Image (cartoon, grey):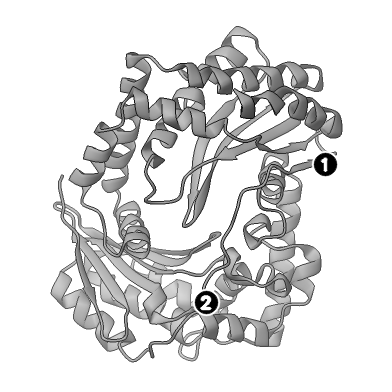
Amino acid sequence: MSVEPRLETLANGLRIATARLPGSESASIAITIEAGTRDETEAEHGLAHLLEHMAFKGTGRRSARAIVEEIEAVGGDINAETGAEHTTFSARVLGEHLESALDVLADLLTDPRFIEADLRLEKSVVAQEIGAALDVPDDRVNDLLAMAAYGEHALGRPILGTLESLTGLSIADLEGFRQRLYAPGRMVISAAGAVDHDVFIKAVERRLGHLVARDVPARQPARRLSGRRSEKGGGEVNMAFAFDGAAFGEDGIYALHMAGLILGGGMSSRLFQSAREEKGLCYGIDAMHWAFVDGGLFVVQSASAPDNADELVATISSEVLRLSDGVSAEELARARAQTRAATVFADESTSAFAARMARQTLLFGAPLERAVVLADIEAVDRQAIAEAAHRIVAAPPAIAVVGPRASRTALSAVAAMRGLATA
């Protein structure tokens, strides 16, 4: 299936992307706002996520129950997600109910009703969410890794906030954040599946064309640090390492993604074969690339029994360094196939297709044609992987460890990886 998305921009700067997917009877719609954790001030920590929750507590036209009942009554589902750089409100329905879903999401976006009693209740819910995350060591190690990599920058703060930061957030803070950042020029509405472009454009214009264009503060640039964070907790030693990556749209981003697949992207990857299959040091191990608008992280993550932690650290260090020696034609072909398949698989989901169009429109000004993406994937050669590998080892990684021997393992990791930057 090859579908070319269509894009239009309203007079107020709101962009609308659609894709009619042949054979689809359902449709997914997403309103994605370029506002996330990195747009919070220190005093607002956790506000973007709390705002996403509070939007579902009711509007001027709908109660909290009516919001979800209206979607579920026609067999659909509704959701929202807050990330470091974006917040998304989404729904999936049969195509005949797409305009109704648009009306519900637009209501959440433009007319949320913030009441003190609801805020107290939702703070309690988010506090439980924070507590649950603290109880999961592999979630906690990711939070610590962000802190180690970005320090005091907003990207270094957990998306959920903390119990302390949550306490101080008010209705005035919610309104201030929404008014400051929820501007039409920072939004994309995307719809994929059984959608008629012209009909949908007119529906969006009727519902959201009145939003007033306004300027939004520029984001503070982020720079990766080689920090170290460790914390006691859990029975296993969870460890994560963040090396230099690339920003969205930057040269080498596909090579870094494929380097992650070769190093730790599945059961045939180097780290899985070495650390799990040959040495039995861990149950699972992963390498991946995280991209942001102005930088990225190449991340390796695993967990082991305390007695195996030092050897696992040494194995990770050795395999990261060995990536610089080059990859085989077979490894490259496998990584290409995995990347291409992931791209095609995602485009067969209306939800994923809508999300991709919104994300790419915010990043690049328009959705990318699949043929262009696949051509960029195919263009990655062994030299590009070698350049990505040298980029990874150009500076010491940020390090995070959670476990019964967290501090000791962190020191072991510092020693094991000190030589990578001079390789």
The image's mark for residue 231 is 1
Eye-nearest disc, 2 or 1:
1
- Would you name the residue on which mark 2 appears? 65
The image shows residue 338, relative to residue 360, as above or below, that is above
**Residue 367 vs residue 257: left or right?**
left
Image quarter of residue 226: top right
User: Picture coordinates of residue 120 (x, y %)?
Assistant: 73, 78
**Residue 144 vs residue 205: left or right?**
right
The image shows residue 102, relative to residue 268, as above or below, that is below
Label 2 environment density (alpha carbons within 10 Å; few <14, some 14–19, many ≥20) = few
Image quarter of residue 338: top left
Q: SS at mark 1?
A: strand
Q: Is residue 48 visible?
A: yes
User: Picture coordinates of residue 50 (x, y %)?
Assistant: 63, 71
**Residue 264 vs residue 409: left or right?**
left
Q: SS at mark 2?
A: helix
User: Picture coordinates of residue 341 (x, y %)?
Assistant: 30, 34
- Residue ID at (24%, 81%): 203
Furthest-front residue in this view:
422
Name the image quarter holding the N terminus. Answer: top left
Image quarter of residue 236: top right
Q: How many marks?
A: 2
Name the image quarter holding the C terminus. Answer: top right
In front of the other: 239 or 251:
251
Label 1 environment density (alpha carbons within 10 Å; few <14, some 14–19, many ≥20) = many
Whichever of callouts 2 and 1 sits on the residue coming sooner in the sequence is 2
